[in-house]
Image (cartoon, grey):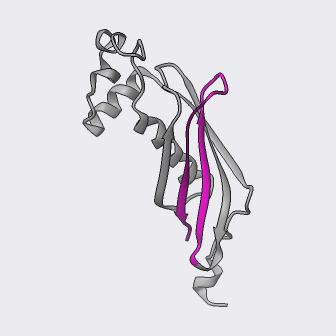
């Protein structure tokens, strides 16, 4: 067996699942706005947001979506994962103080190319889906 073959990590089985949970804080919003440059007042200004159909500030959709990356890179498929693509559908707003659970599930595996497709879903503390999508990962 070659040295390279000895270090090949098995691909996850279809149906494998992993999840992580995080409560979104004011600091998370502020830091994300600074890092991303997205200073839309809908996320940062309570007075402005109160005048929108949301009625209050909402969390950046991309901040919520970025939580998926933590599960993919750390848990399933895990370390070494290379993010190739992600579809996203934003279903409901997320607010400061909401607790978001990200769940990913392996739905397809292409062994010959070492590609893994995962259903990705974010739910809030009430069990309401706030975001769904599909990720494509190259796994070493």
Q: Which residue is drawn at 45% across and 23% down?
A: 25
Q: Where is residue 73 in the image (x, y as percent from the top left)?
A: 53, 54
Q: Which residue is drawn at 29% across and 38% down?
A: 35
Res. 115 image quadrant: bottom right
In the displayed structure, would residue 78 be above or below residue 3? above
- Tell whether position 120 is magenta: yes
Please give left or right for residue 107 compared with residue 41 in the image: right
- Tell whether position 109 is magenta: no
Q: Residue at x 29, y 13 (%)?
A: 48
Name the quadrant of the N terminus.
bottom right
Q: Where is residue 126 in the image (x, y as percent from the top left)?
A: 65, 22
Name the quadrant of the C terminus.
bottom right
Please give left or right for residue 87 compared with residue 103 in the image: left
Res. 13 image quadrant: bottom right
Q: Position of residue 87 (x, y in %)?
A: 49, 51
Which segment did they paint magenta? Answer: 113-140
Return the residue found at the far bottom.
Answer: 1
Res. 109 image quadrant: bottom right
In the displayed structure, would residue 76 be above or below residue 48? below
The secondary structure that most of the magenta stretch takes on is strand
Of the pair 45 and 31, the residue shown nearer to us: 45
Of the pair 9 and 41, the residue shown nearer to us: 41
């Amino acid at each position: 067996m070659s040295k390279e073959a000895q270090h090949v990590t098995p691909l996850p089985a279809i149906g494998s699942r992993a999840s992580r949970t995080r409560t979104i804080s004011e600091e998370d919003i502020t830091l994300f706005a600074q890092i991303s440059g997205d200073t839309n007042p809908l996320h940062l200004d309570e007075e402005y947001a109160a005048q929108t159909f949301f009625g209050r500030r909402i969390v950046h959709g991309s901040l919520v979506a970025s939580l998926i990356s933590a599960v993919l890179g750390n848990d399933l498929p895990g370390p070494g994962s290379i993010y190739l693509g992600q579809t996203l559908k934003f279903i409901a707003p997320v607010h400061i103080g909401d607790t978001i659970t990200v769940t990913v599930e392996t739905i397809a595996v292409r062994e010959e190319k070492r590609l893994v497709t995962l259903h990705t879903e974010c739910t809030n503390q009430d069990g309401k889906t706030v975001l769904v999508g599909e990720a494509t990962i190259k796994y070493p």
